[in-house]
Image (cartoon, helix red, strand yellow):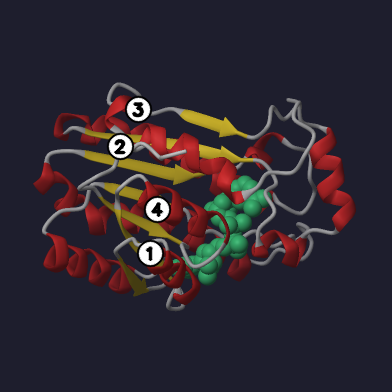
Amino acid sequence: MSVPQTHTGRVAVITGAGRGIGQALALGLAARGATVVAVDLHYPEETMALLTAAGHTGMGLVADVSDPVQTAAVGMRITQEFGHADILVNNAGVFPFVDIDDLDYDIWRRIMAVNLDSQFLMVKAVLPAMKAGGWGRIINLTSNSIVTNAPGLSHYMASKMGNIGFSRGLANDVAPFGITVNAVGPTLTITPGVREVHPPEALVAVAQAQAIKRNGRPEDLVGTIAFLSSDDAAFVTGQTIMADGGYAR
Ligand SMILES: NC(=O)c1ccc[n+]([C@@H]2O[C@H](COP(=O)([O-])OP(=O)(O)OC[C@H]3O[C@@H](n4cnc5c(N)ncnc54)[C@H](O)[C@@H]3O)[C@@H](O)[C@H]2O)c1
């Protein structure tokens, strides 16, 4: 089946694109015609190889998205290379389990920096190039964990609630420029990051709490984010969509 070319001519910047959900989004938006800028802590070698193998063009960039200097450099590089940026998917995030007794200020700050500050910093870095094009789509990854009862995630839930608040507020500031902002929340999705921290029994329990009784796959996020980053979603902004298999609340 051919994929509709809804994203032809769009430059799509995706953070944390080296693996997991970010990699699936890079491949999914490229398949719809976007030129992907894949940003990650390390050069996103595997993602770039997969893009090339599928016949797509793109650019891999190395940056810590919690760092104001590195994110500003990403913005400048995109402007130099393309002159505009159309889509920003703030996907990079970390989710270590840390009980409140072990949660110190350094861990708290690090989680806020990577999961929340990064979304602000990348918006600041990319917004001038987005305004230059007079059209834009910003999508911030949140998580359905904010409505779960999982212990050891107070820092993560706080940051992921922040992603929703930032999206709602920012939507008002950028609407005059033809730019929409939405948040998307996956359920527990089988990615390299999840395999590092979740025991197999936790995966089964989450799947059982969903209407659709299987764990998420990175590809499950592509359709929602492709829609939100398309022309079709021009009147959808400030919203949060939980693409989570119908997790029970
Ligand atoms: N996988 C899930 O179950 C799940 C559920 C809900 C929400 N999410 C959210 O989805 C996003 C992606 O999750 P994932 O499971 O694919 O993670 P993952 O750990 O598999 O991949 C994350 C990628 O982000 C990159 N990254 C981490 N910190 C970075 C930084 N400071 N700068 C640049 N890149 C950085 C990593 O190098 C990695 O390539 C996160 O925001 C996460 O909170 C994931």
Q: Where is residue 203 in the image (x, y as percent from the top left)?
A: 81, 49
For this view, does 238 lie left or right of residue 129?
Answer: right
Viewer-nearest of discs 4 and 3: 3
Q: Give the residue type at disc 2.
A: Thr
Image point (15%, 52%), residue name = 128
Secondary structure type for disc 1: strand
Q: Give the residue type at disc 4.
A: Gln
Is the residue marked 3 within 8 Å of ligand 1, measured from its CB?
Answer: no
Image point (79%, 39%), residue name = 149
Q: Earlier in the sequence, mark 4 or mark 1?
A: 1
Viewer-nearest of discs 1 and 2: 2
Q: Earlier in the sequence, mark 4 or mark 3?
A: 4
Q: Are marks 4 and 3 in contact (CB under 8 Å)?
A: no
Q: Give the residue type at disc 3.
A: Thr
Secondary structure type for disc 3: loop
Mark 4 Cα within 10 Å, few/some/many (few <14, many 20+)? many
Disc 3 and disc 1: Cα gap in Å?
24 Å
Q: Give the residue type at disc 1.
A: Ala
Viewer-nearest of discs 3 and 1: 1
Mark 2 Cα within 10 Å, few/some/many (few <14, many 20+)? some
Q: Do the residues labelled 4 and 1 touch (CB within 8 Å)?
A: no
Q: Is residue 79 above or below residue 1?
A: below
Q: Is residue 190 above or below residue 176?
A: below
Count of numbered circles in the view: 4
Mark 1 Cα within 10 Å, few/some/many (few <14, many 20+)? many
Q: Do the residues labelled 4 and 2 touch (CB within 8 Å)?
A: no
Is the residue marked 4 within 8 Å of ligand 1, measured from its CB?
Answer: no
Name the residue carrying label 1: 38
Name the residue carrying label 2: 6
Name the residue carrying label 4: 119
